[in-house]
Image: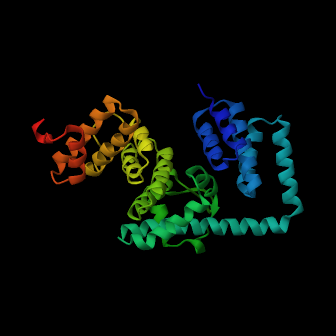
Amino acid sequence: MSNPITDAQALEAEGNLNEAIRAYDSVLNTTDEPSALALANFRVGAIYRTWGELFTAQRFLAKAHQLSPSDTAIRDAIEELNQHFSENRESVADEMTRKNSDQIISLFRIATGIKLITMDKPVQAYPLLKSRTKIFPNAAVAKHLLTDIQITEEERNSAIDFLLEKDWLVSTGVSLYTIAESGLSAFYTELAQLHIDNAAYTEAVACYEQALWLNPSQHQLRYRQVICHAEAEAWESAVETLSQLPTEEVPEGIDLEAYHTAVAQSYHHVYQTTQDEGTKEKVIEACEVVLRLNKRAREISKLLGSYQGKKSWWRR
């Protein structure tokens, strides 16, 4: 059985720092063991320190020190950071102002993008939302960086009000705000649909993955991932995702024809390699579902015929 901390450390050692941060954050959300929490906070803080995200690093290092005050490595890291703050007061103050401004801009773009979608203006929304994924490659990084943002009354605007009204922005102190996980989930989910509209299916899968990490109960997103994998011709990934789906009926809101077409095509391509009879049956079953939904689905009718010869699907 894998150890979450060990897995996160392995990702960090390999240089996959964004993934490592997410793995460490998962540890923070799933354990109450002090030594594991201290180590996860310490490593997240250390990564942000190397990235120059000094204030985010300070937050995690302080928590690590609180959990393990006798750890010399943690204490040394905090002392080094505090010394940097002390020796560079003016530049640190300027950096704090700039970072805070950048965070407000990110909130503005996320909120404005989602509002434009509700106004049926996806073309204008797409570049606004897409630009944020370069800064926030995954939900953990977004959550960490969009924390304790100072927003004065003069800086409040319609976008900030929109986030507050949706409870996607929560108050954490006087004039301090932090984005809620529900707001981040909406951001990644809406961006995924925009990616789909622009035939960027691999990017859509990645966005759905972030939304699922934030809220694993959103089972319907897995079904959408299957469709995206098939559109990207990532057949094995589609089948792997299918293996993770519950056996219950396809949830509401999923395009049934598109989903079962993706299932049929994915299992078909995997069958070409495995020649597994169980996989073959899944191809046939999915094709029949599609043709019950749409008798004119020519490609699926042709695919089914390749498995059954000249026998019509409705006469089986």
Horizontal relation, residue 265 to residue 31: left or right: left
The colour scheme used to paint the residues is rainbow
Residue 109, image x and y in percent? 52, 68
Q: Residue furthest top?
A: 1
Residue 74, image x and y in percent? 81, 41
Residue 27, image x and y in percent? 62, 37
Q: Who is closer to the viewer here, 284 or 181?
A: 284
Q: Is residue 119 above or below residue 270?
A: below
Query: Is the C terminus in the top left, top right, bottom left or bottom right quadrant?
Result: top left
Horizontal relation, residue 245 to residue 16: left or right: left
Q: Please identify the quarter of the rendering in which residue 174 is found.
A: bottom right
Query: Is the N terminus in the top left, top right, bottom left or bottom right quadrant?
Result: top right
Q: Which residue is found at the position 20% from the left and 41% from the top?
A: 288
Q: Is residue 90 above or below residue 299?
A: below
Q: Which residue is found at the position 60% from the left and 28% from the top?
A: 2
Q: Which residue is found at the position 65% from the left and 69% from the top?
A: 101
Q: Which residue is found at the position 35% from the left and 70% from the top?
A: 120
Q: Who is closer to the viewer here, 228 or 75?
A: 228
Q: Who is closer to the viewer here, 20 or 53?
A: 20
Q: Is residue 291 visible?
A: yes
Q: Please identify the quarter of the rendering in which residue 71 is found.
A: top right
Please count the marks in the image. Answer: 0
Q: Please identify the quarter of the rendering in which residue 39 is found.
A: top right
Horizontal relation, residue 88 to residue 270: left or right: right
Q: Residue furthest front?
A: 309
Q: Is residue 161 visible?
A: no
Q: Who is closer to the viewer here, 148 or 174?
A: 148
Residue 299, image x and y in percent? 24, 52
